[in-house]
Image (cartoon, rainbow, N blue to C red):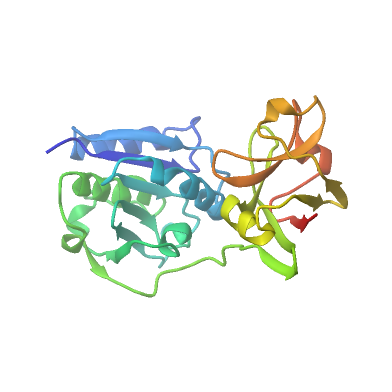
Amino acid sequence: MKPRIITLITDFGTADTYAGVMKGVILSGSPMAAVVDITHEIAPQDVRGACFALLTAYSWFPKRTIHLVVVDPGVGSERRPLIIETKEYFFVGPDNGVFTPVLAGPGVKAVYEITDSASFLPAVSATFHGRDIFAPVAARLSKGVRPSQIGAPISDYVLLDWPQPAEVKAGAAEGEILHIDRFGNLITNFSRKYVRELTGGGDFYLRCDGRSIKQMVPAYAYAKPGQLCYVFGSSDFLEIAVANGSAAALLKARRGDPVMLLKK
């Protein structure tokens, strides 16, 4: 059997040993697994931030990849550990809404509560289920163990209220900032598909923080330094940007702030 890929999204950072220890457990259980770090820089306990990271990353991996997400403010509580099986991937992590983009989308085959304690490490810490439950379960999946051998099917999993843009009048819709990247780009929830359907492929502009933003560019380099503009980014969401600067700083923006899209 070919080595399986296991990806990691966590809020552990890299200053502590948590992420490295989790990899050690995975490789101890499945030495041929290929472990890929997507990010360990999700803000602490930021489940929505992990949702966005997962949404924009998981589909770029080969089929049968196992995506392990550990952003788990409820660790040690009654929240359930999950395996999700879709037509193309497996997902492992806590039942706290972190898998909302996957569970709300197409292709979900089954969701399992992890119940087989024999799949865990012998001693389970109340504060580190990433190491003691999720990592060994991911390792077992990578060796071909079926989710049904590790858990029991459920249908009452947690879904977050994931923000969707809404048309407020003909040719105008309200969305919001989903994510602010390290460059200060404001990534909205206006997808290319949504914008095309709303505008019929016509011209449009944005309003954010009381400012009208009318300069659309095909890439950041087409804007003048310091110019406020918007562009469809690599994840196919509309981004507000400042060439060689930070739109977040200029607009004093935060995740969740409203953005209006208006047809010209």
Q: Quadrant of the C terminus?
A: bottom right
Q: Position of residue 62 (x, y in %)?
A: 30, 40
How many numbered marks appear? 0
| Relative to 189, 98 lies left or right | left
Q: Position of residue 260 (x, y in %)?
A: 77, 57
In depth, the one of 139 and 65 nearer the eye is 65
Residue 227 lies in quadrant? top right
> Looking at the picture, does residue 227 appear above or below residue 67?
above
Q: Position of residue 91 (x, y in %)?
A: 34, 53
Q: Residue furthest right?
A: 210
Q: Quadrant of the N terminus?
A: top left
Residue 7 lies in quadrant? top left
In depth, the one of 192 and 36 nearer the eye is 192
> Looking at the picture, does residue 36 appear above or below residue 197?
above
| Relative to 69, 240 lies left or right | right
> Looking at the picture, does residue 43 appear above or below residue 74?
above
Residue 235 lies in quadrant? top right
In depth, the one of 70 and 196 nearer the eye is 196
| Relative to 197, 240 lies left or right | right
Q: Position of residue 130 (x, y in %)?
A: 36, 47
In depth, the one of 9 and 117 nearer the eye is 9
Q: Residue furthest left?
A: 1
Residue sitting at 50 percent across and 56 percent down?
73
Residue sitting at 43 percent across and 62 percent down?
105
